[in-house]
Image: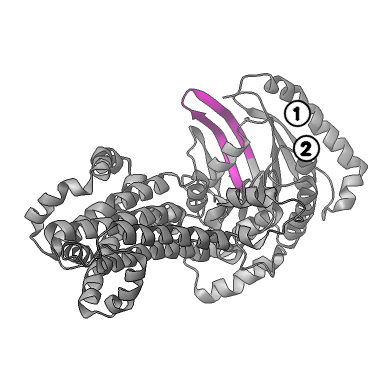
Amino acid sequence: MGVNHRIEVRGAGKSFGSLQVFRDLNLDVGEREVLAVIGPSGCGKTTLLRCMNGLVPLSEGEILVEGARMTAPREGVAMVFQHFGLFPWKTVQQNVAYGLKLAGAAASEIGEKVPYFINLVGLTGFEGYYPYQVSGGMQQRCGLARALAVGPRVMLMDEPFGAVDAQTREILQFELLRIWEARPTTMVFVTHAIDEAVLMGDRVLVLKGRPAVVHEIVTVDLPRPRSRATLSDPRFAELREHVWGTLMADARRAEFEITR
Amino acid sequence: MTAVGTALAAGQPAAGNGTRPWYAAPLALQLAAGVVLLGAWEIGVRMLAPAYVARPSRVVVVFLRVLSDAQFLAAAAATLRAVLEGLLLSIMLGTVIGLAMGRVVAVERGLRYYVNSLFATPMVAILPLMSLWFGYDGDARLATVVFAALFSVVVNTCDGARAVPNDYLEVAHSFRARGWRTLLDVVLPASLPYLLAGVRLAAGRALVAAVVAEFFVSIPGLGYYILFNSRTFKHSEAFVAVIVLVAVGVGFDALINWITRRYLPWARRGG
């Protein structure tokens, strides 16, 4: 068990009934590492993330976070959801405070942290708005603040920018990079966008097949801090092409397969 | 109503976009329809019916006198109190039963057919039994109100609790909320729009139940007031009680609408 590995995945497999989603996954994620996970749709990226959070049990193997087996959600791990997962009856402020309240934080702590994280994600002035009153991008900023507020050491990002438009996605990517640089944590970033995987990740885990297995783990040797300039780095283009090549051979086959 | 207004406005040549002649305004049409209906009633009664039959002009004359009559006020208070008490009981009990049915499969399976059958039972049909079980007094009325109101709250809350999107429950789980916290923090607020729809339905049924119980069991209240005055040829007085009942029904509906707009602004957006 490596000292610097915050997440360890050992022989992990997951089946729903007779459908095997992934099998025999082995990987580690370091303390200040961003692991991007990419693969054709339906390959079990999100399921893997949910297993890492302890929301659903594995069928085989184990996932350790900070050395402890994940059988249920635990302190120190926070998830950002693809469809934001904000409670519509709570305002931005109340949504951000949700995790802290559940963790039993004192009112003074909530009063201090909530405005801080609302400001960090750029939502100051929108505290009293309900989710339906703000844009998708702002809703995900809120979801991000809610996750950050509990002080997680592991962030699980489930296609966090998959449900927002292209421009907003770009803005949010660089916002997230900025926030991460200021406070680097372990992050697992599930996406189906190749650019995003290469931009975000220190490594890109490419899954393939049904059941999915590790196809390749691509090391992204782009310097940090990353920014818009990273996109015009020739190395970025190379890595993107490499991941594209790895992915597409499998993606075409997957597209023509009958989905569950 | 809007369709009529639009049709009338469209019939006006070159009235300009969005400008309607004064007589096509909704309020003007509503008032005009009211005047025509009341006028027809007044003339009809004057021409065809004996003098004691209620007509608008007589109702207006007795209106304030009835409203300040101690006996009438006592009757109104008794009925409204029974309705409110019954509704409150139904909301509390119905929310608990509905949430349990909505979230616990065993409870839902056990109670489903009984609740659906009782929801469909005509309240009037069991009224004679209510008076046998609860006596010929206010208890029978309260029981009837609860019987009429409870199951629409249960059925709606159950639907609401079952319709809670899985996403919300997963978020709660991810943030390590369990059991009761999730029920109070997620399931209950997510079910509130359904619950309020149930209360709205229940309120109408409760009002009917209280009045019918008073008719049948002769308990002092607005229903009995109507019955008594109708039988003693004081139709106009009886009509004042009817107007008060209508006002209460409409008022409660407006109150629920206001609560929904004010405290559940998100609910109108479909989550």
Left or right, residue A117 beside residue A199: left
* Residue in view at x 65 percent, y 55 percent: A139
Asked if A19 appears above or below A113 in the picture, the reply is: above
Spot occupied by residue B139 in the image (x, y as percentages of width and height)? 14, 63
Left or right, residue A1 beside residue A171: left
Q: For residue A134, which quarter of the picture?
A: bottom right
* Residue in view at x 61 percent, y 52 percent: B5
Q: Is residue A23 magenta?
A: yes
Q: Earlier in the sequence, mark 1 or mark 2?
A: 2
Q: Is residue A101 magenta?
A: no
Out of A100 and A64, give the one closest to the viewer. Answer: A100
Crowd class of label 2 (few under 14; some 14 to 19; many from 20; radius 10 Å): many
Tell me which amino acid carries mark 1: Leu
Residue that numbered label 2 is attached to: A194
Tell me which amino acid carries mark 2: Ile
Asked if A130 appears above or below A243 in the picture, the reply is: below
Out of B99 and B266, give the one closest to the viewer. Answer: B266
The rendered magenta stretch, by its main secondary structure, is classed as: strand
Q: For residue A218, which quarter of the picture?
A: top right
Q: Are marks 1 and 2 in contact (CB under 8 Å)?
A: yes
- Chain containing mark 2: A
* Residue in view at x 49 percent, y 45 percent: B165
* Residue in view at x 87 percent, y 52 percent: A228
Residue that numbered label 1 is attached to: A247
Which residues lie in the magenta part? Answer: A1-27
**Tag 1, which secondary structure?**
helix
Spot occupied by residue A28 in the image (x, y as percentages of width and height)? 64, 42
Out of B267 and A239, give the one closest to the viewer. Answer: B267
